Image (tube, helix red, strand yellow):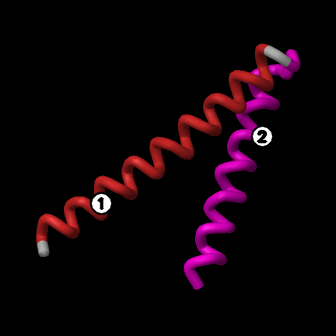
Amino acid sequence: MAEEKMMHGKGKVLELLGILAIVYGIINYLTVALGWPSYGAWIAGGVILVLVGWAKKTMAS
């Protein structure tokens, strides 16, 4: 039982790291390929994270 709980926690951490890696990749793409200023790319990344959080919350309820 405790092992199952620990594996669930690891899955959440890996999911969070995966989402952050995708957003970081999008930010790098916007700054390098499209020439966006870094602050604009980070704002867009923050908006993406908020939307992902909202979608997960909506799907859970």
Q: Residue furthest left?
A: 2
- Residue located at (69% from left, 22% from top): 28
The stretch drawn in magenta includes residue 18: no
Label 2 crowd bin: few (<14), some (14–19), many (20+), radius 10 Å:
some
Q: Is residue 44 left or right of residue 9?
A: right
Element on which disc 1 rests: helix
Task: Please report the bounds of the magenta region as a residue range.
Answer: 34-61
- Residue 19 x, y percent position in the rendering: 56, 45
Q: Nearer the viewer, residue 51 or 33?
A: 33
Please determine whether, in this image, residue 40 is positioned above or below residue 45: above
Q: Quadrant of the N terminus?
A: bottom left
Asked whether 41 falls inside the magenta stretch, the response is: yes
> What amino acid is labelled 1 in the image?
Gly
Quarter of the image with the C terminus in it: bottom right
Which residue is found at the position 72% from the left and 49% from the top?
48
Q: Toward which corner of the image does residue 22 lie, by quadrant?
A: top right
User: Is 41 situated above or below 50?
Assistant: above
Number of marks drawn: 2
Rate crowding at label 1 as few (under 14), some (14 to 19) or many (20 or more) other CA atoms within 10 Å: few
Q: Which residue is mark 2?
A: 44
Placement of 18 over or under 39, stated as above or below: below
**Residue shown at the point (29%, 60%) measured from the top left:** 9
Identify residue type, mark 2.
Answer: Ala
- Residue 27 or 3: which is nearer the viewer? 3
Q: CA distance from mark 1 to mark 2?
A: 28 Å
Hey, which quadrant is residue 38 in on the image?
top right
16 to the left or right of 6: right
Q: Nearer the viewer, residue 23 or 38?
A: 23
Disc 1 marks which residue? 9
At mark 2, the secondary structure is helix
User: Which is nearer the eye, 45 or 39?
Assistant: 45
* Location of residue 60 by image quarter: bottom right
